[in-house]
Amino acid sequence: MTFNTQSAVLCSFVPRTYEQDPDALRAPFFHRNSDFDEFIFYHDVHFFSKDNIKPGMATLHPRGIHHGPHPKALANQAKKTATDEYAVMLDGLNPIHVLPEGDRCEWKEYWASWSSAQTVK
């Protein structure tokens, strides 16, 4: 967490080593934010929990939607000892609405990205 306010949390994803204990639950884990919308802007690729992410993309995880690492990204974690991503996440207590300017970088089909038929356009 980089900043915390009464209605939002801003988190920075920067390179870090993975959890070293073999019994540790590696972040990220599958979860559902019941109180916050989660918006992530990806500055640099190889995001540790997502597949098909390119620099400059953004995803929106509305509150209550179960999400976590994509299967391919989860499999790739076993091959690495550290992350190498740069991203910013905003968790908002109030609903997050993407403005027209954000349409250029939002991955609108993100909600279906766990489907093997889904591809980035």
Image: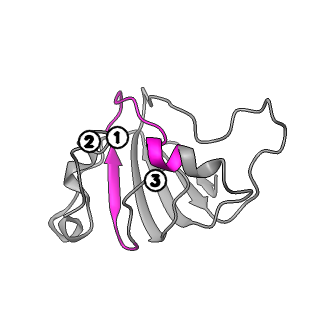
Which kind of residue does numbered mark 2 sit on?
Trp
Predominant SS of the magenta segment:
loop
Which residue is at the front of the view, 49 or 86?
49
Distance between mark 3 and mark 1 Cα atoms: 11 Å
User: Which residue is at 64% across, 41% downward?
Assistant: 27
Evaluate if marks 3 and 2 touch, with contact meaning CB atoms under 8 Å apart. Answer: no
Q: Is residue 49 visible?
A: yes
Q: Up-down: is 21 above or below 39? A: above
Query: Magenta region: which residues?
Result: 55-74
Which kind of residue does numbered mark 3 sit on?
Leu
Q: Up-down: is 67 above or below 99? A: above
Q: Depth-wise, is mark 3 or mark 1 nearer the camera?
A: 3
Residue 74: horizontal and vertical position, in percent?
Answer: 54, 44
Q: What element carries label 2?
A: helix
Quadrant in which the C terminus appears: bottom left
Residue corresponding to mark 2: 111
Magenta segment includes 46: no
